[in-house]
Image (cartoon, helix red, strand yellow):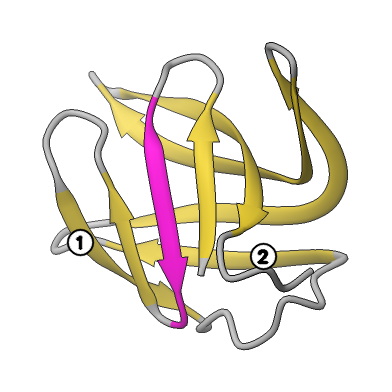
Amino acid sequence: MLLCLGIAPRFALTVQSDVVTFDYLGDGTFRLDPPLTSSDVVYQRHSLITRRQVWPVVLEKRDCGIRNLDFPMRMELRAPVNGATQSFFGCCLWADGDG
């Protein structure tokens, strides 16, 4: 499972295969396309599928830090907010010890 913590705005996001949980503005469970099938990520593009929209998601193996914590992955999710698109940046790690 990939666990991501948001920098600004703050959020938590998890990815397990094709299931994404994203807690920004209420809890939500969404589908990831294509599914995340391996922890061997260098750079990947995905889509988070909501009932009405498709949000682009980029995962890349790149040092990322939150306060004094270092993470091996960085993610960006672009979501429509108030008629515009907002980027959500987060730092991620493999919660099951992979990667």
| View extreme (front): residue | 97
| Residue with the mark numbered 2 | 45
Q: Quadrant of the C terminus?
A: bottom right
Residue under the point 45% across and 25% down: 86
* Residue 69 spot, x, y in % from top left: 72, 25
Amino acid type at mark 1: Thr
* Observer-nearest of 88 and 72: 72
Q: Main secondary structure of the magenta part?
A: strand
Disc 2 on helix, strand or loop? Answer: strand
| Residue with the mark numbered 1 | 29
* Residue 21 spot, x, y in % from top left: 29, 57
Is residue 12 shown in magenta? yes
Residue under the point 41% across and 73% down: 32
Q: Which is more foreground, mark 2 or mark 1?
A: 1
The residues colored magenta run 11-17
* Residue 79 spot, x, y in % from top left: 39, 38
- Mark nearer the N terminus (2 vs 1): 1
Name above or below for residue 12 compared with residue 31: above
Amino acid type at mark 2: Arg
Asked where in the image residue 43 lies, by quadrant, the reply is bottom right
Name above or below for residue 66 compared with residue 63: above
Is residue 51 shown in magenta? no
